Amino acid sequence: MKRKLSLLTFTGLFLIFACTPSPRYGAGSAHKKNSSANAKKTSKKQIHHKKVMTGIASYYGQDFHGKLTANGEVFDMYGLTAAHKTLPLNTIVRVTNLGNDKSLILRINDRGPYIEGRILDCSYGAAKKLGYLKAGTARVRIEVIEWGDDEYMQHD
C-alpha cells in the first residue's frame, strides 16, 4: 500500500510539473537570444548600393553558354541578363547605353565582370539590343528597379 501511495504521489507530482508552462526568461535573456540569431542571419557582409550607377559595361556569351550562373540557373547568352560584382542576385535593373540612348531591363543573375574598370557584364543578347556588340564595351547607366533576393536557385 505504501509503495502504491508513493508511486501515485510521484506520478501526480510528475504530471503537475510536466504540465506547467516553461520558465520565462527576463527581457535581457530573450534579447540576447534574439540578437545572436539576428547576428547569424546578418553575418554576410552588408554592401550598400547606390540606386543609380554609371560605368563601363562589356558582354560575355559563347564561352559560358549552357554553364551555371552565380544564382544557379543555366546561362543563356541570348537572354536578357547581366553579371554585377555586388548587386544582390535577381535584382532588376534598367541599363542605358549612354552612347546611343538605348535602354533595356535586365536581371542580375551572375557575378562579374572580372576586368578592372568595368561595372557590368551583359549577356550577348543584351549587348546586341543595347548596340555595343561591335565596340565590345559601352558607357552605361544602371538604375535599380527592384532589389533582388540574392537567392541561389535550387536544381532537382
Image (tube, rainbow, N blue to C red):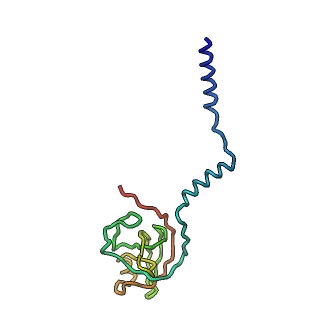
x and y, in percent, of residue 64 in the image: 32, 71
Q: Which residue appears at 49% of the width and 63% of the height?
A: 149
x and y, in percent, of residue 137 in the image: 40, 84
Hey, which residue is sitting farthest bottom in the picture?
99
Between 32 and 131, which is closer to the camera in this rendering? 32
Q: Is residue 80 above or below residue 101?
A: above
Instruction: Answer with the quarter of the image where residue 73 lies.
Output: bottom left
Q: Which residue appears at 40% of the width and 82% of the height?
A: 130
Tell me if 54 is positioned left or right of 115 in this view: right
Between 100 and 137, which is closer to the camera in this rendering? 137
Instruction: Answer with the quarter of the image where residue 134 lies.
Output: bottom left
Q: Which residue appears at 44% of the width and 75% of the height?
A: 105
x and y, in percent, of residue 71 in the image: 41, 65
Tell me if 14 is positioned left or right of 145 in this view: right
x and y, in percent, of residue 68 in the image: 35, 65
Hey, which residue is sitting farthest top in the picture?
1
Q: Which residue appears at 38% of the width and 67% of the height?
A: 69
Position of the C terminus, as image quadrant, is bottom left
- The total number of labels drawn is 0
Q: Is residue 77 above or below residue 19?
A: below
Position of the N terminus, as image quadrant, is top right
